[in-house]
Image: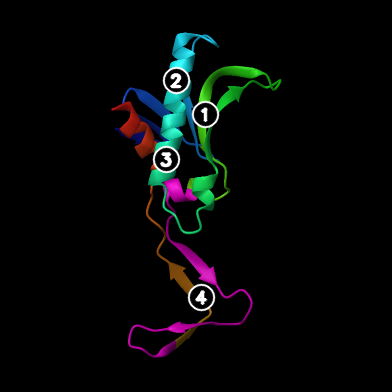
């Protein structure tokens, strides 16, 4: 598995990650046997991704679906897309880096410190979140 700039290859397929998170699979002829086969595969990837996605409220998992691609005129085009339709799906899939956080509604933030005391800060450094590539893992798992 190699990845560079949101493009991953493995399991005989290529995953292109752009916000929102989308997996593209190419199809050659609409209505053909390969198209029906890949439709089933794309739906299976969506089911697998729903089971692999981290769940807090279940909203992200409920927006994962497989749909046929459309061209710029809105007509059905070749291929299928398995996508996560939330604004934060990309950040869950790719992770985030360290970032500063400031107090929003008040002048300072109040939280328990490491020694059990109360700590007040107007600025903290968030460590970031690790990547959880549920779409990539689902595609690789289904591709074998």
The residues tagged by marks 4 and 3 sit, at their Cα atoms, a distance apart of: 36 Å
Q: Is residue 107 left or right of residue 57?
A: right
Badge 2: residue crowd in 10 Å (few <14, some 14–19, many ≥20)? some
Badge 1: residue crowd in 10 Å (few <14, some 14–19, many ≥20)? many
Q: Quadrant of the N terminus?
A: top left
What span is in magenta? 91-118
Badge 4: residue crowd in 10 Å (few <14, some 14–19, many ≥20)? few
User: Which mark is drawn over residue 127?
Assistant: none
The residues tagged by marks 3 and 1 sit, at their Cα atoms, a distance apart of: 13 Å
User: Which mark is drawn over residue 49?
Assistant: 3
The residues tagged by marks 1 and 2 sit, at their Cα atoms, a distance apart of: 11 Å
Q: Residue at coordinates 57% horizontally, 24% vertically from top-left?
A: 68
Q: Is residue 106 above or below residue 51?
A: below
Q: Is residue 72 above or below residue 18?
A: above
According to the picture, the residue beneath numbered tag 4 turns out to be 123
Mark 1 / mark 4, whichever is N-terminal: 1
């Amino acid at each position: 598995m190699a990845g560079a700039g949101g493009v991953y290859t493995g399991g005989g397929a290529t995953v292109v990650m752009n916000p929102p998170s989308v997996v593209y699979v190419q199809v050659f002829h609409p209505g053909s046997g390969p198209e029906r086969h890949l439709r089933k595969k794309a739906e299976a990837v969506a089911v697998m991704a729903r089971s692999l996605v981290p769940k807090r409220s279940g909203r992200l998992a409920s927006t994962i679906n497989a749909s046929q691609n459309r061209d710029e005129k809105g007509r059905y085009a070749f291929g299928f897309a398995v996508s996560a339709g939330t604004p934060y799906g990309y950040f869950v899939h790719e992770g985030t880096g360290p970032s500063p956080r400031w107090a929003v509604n008040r002048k300072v933030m109040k939280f328990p410190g490491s020694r059990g005391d109360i700590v007040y800060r107007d600025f903290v450094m968030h460590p970031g979140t690790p990547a959880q590539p549920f779409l990539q893992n689902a595609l690789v798992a289904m591709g074998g």
